[in-house]
Amino acid sequence: MNILRNIQFEGAEFRPTLLDLYVERTGEQKPIIIFSHGFKGFKDYGCWDLVGKTFAGAGFVFIKYNFSHNGTTLKNPSDFFDLEAFGNNNFTKELRDLGNVIDWVVNGDVGIPINEFNRSEIYLIGHSRGGGTTLLKAAEDSRIRKFATWASINSFARNWHTSELIEQWKEKGVIYIANSRTHQQMPLFYQLYEDFQNNKERFDISAAIKRLEIPGLIVHGTSDPTVPYDDAQTIVNQNINHLYLKAIEGGDHVFGSSHPWDKDHLPADLKKVVETCIDFFREVES
């Protein structure tokens, strides 16, 4: 298996970031999967490396990347060393990052012979908030043929439920959210809310779902404590002709994975998720 790690590419606002590419070189063209991590996530979290190897072993090219403003750096791609960048992240930047990865795959020299890539079959996977970004990109970019979401949100505004919170955010210029794993207080600058307000139509996930005309698989754990399973049902019910729901009974937000992950196999729930996606990407007609 060929694994190209930490390939540098240009993200939003010319900020460099990194991606990994997995492929079994056979001389035959393969569909390309691009994976987007979630909020407070990064490409090297827990089991994502094993996920990449599993998809590549099943006959896909698999790419995972860091959002340019997720708080990691080129030297430290798995740690939040740049909280200023994290605080300045927004949905416009994440959509641009994903678009730049797609452009790179379609037009760039990726370091692997072109006969290994089927550039007309590009699929997306997004986890958690990355699922929201995936839903929007799938609806607005005609190069995407299929997609899947894992434990996806159904709205970017799901946590902005009080005018009091927004007023405090505006007044102070920043709010903080705890990272229970690293014990960091992660800043969110008010520009995130302004970006959302200035692009409400584009960032309306519900509207994007209704516009979708390509197949999508919505995977969600029934015991997800972070994003309720009901969110997945809401997503699918808005476009029952193109979206398919896969419930992982008892599954949590990361499907049994954790960081770091020192085992050489996927947790049972995540293995189900990956196998379901492999079947979906192989069998569902675009």
Image: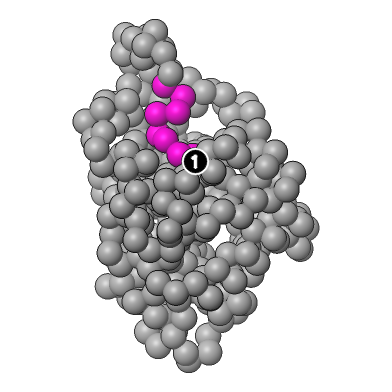
Residue 213 visible, this orientation: yes
For residue 184, which quarter of the picture?
A: top right
Residue at which label 1 appears: 234
Count the marks.
Answer: 1
x%, y% of residue 100? 30, 58
Residue 3 visible, this orientation: no
x%, y% of residue 225? 65, 33
Q: Nearer the viewer, residue 102 or 152?
A: 152
Secondary element at tag 1: helix
| Left or right relative to 63: residue 190 | left
For residue 1, which quarter of the picture?
A: bottom right
Q: Residue furthest bottom?
A: 27
Range drawn in magenta: 153-160
Which residue is drawn at the image coordinates 34% and 9% (left, top)?
Answer: 167
Query: Please, is residue 171 above or below residue 277 in the view?
Result: above
Query: Please, is residue 238 above or below residue 201 in the view?
Result: below
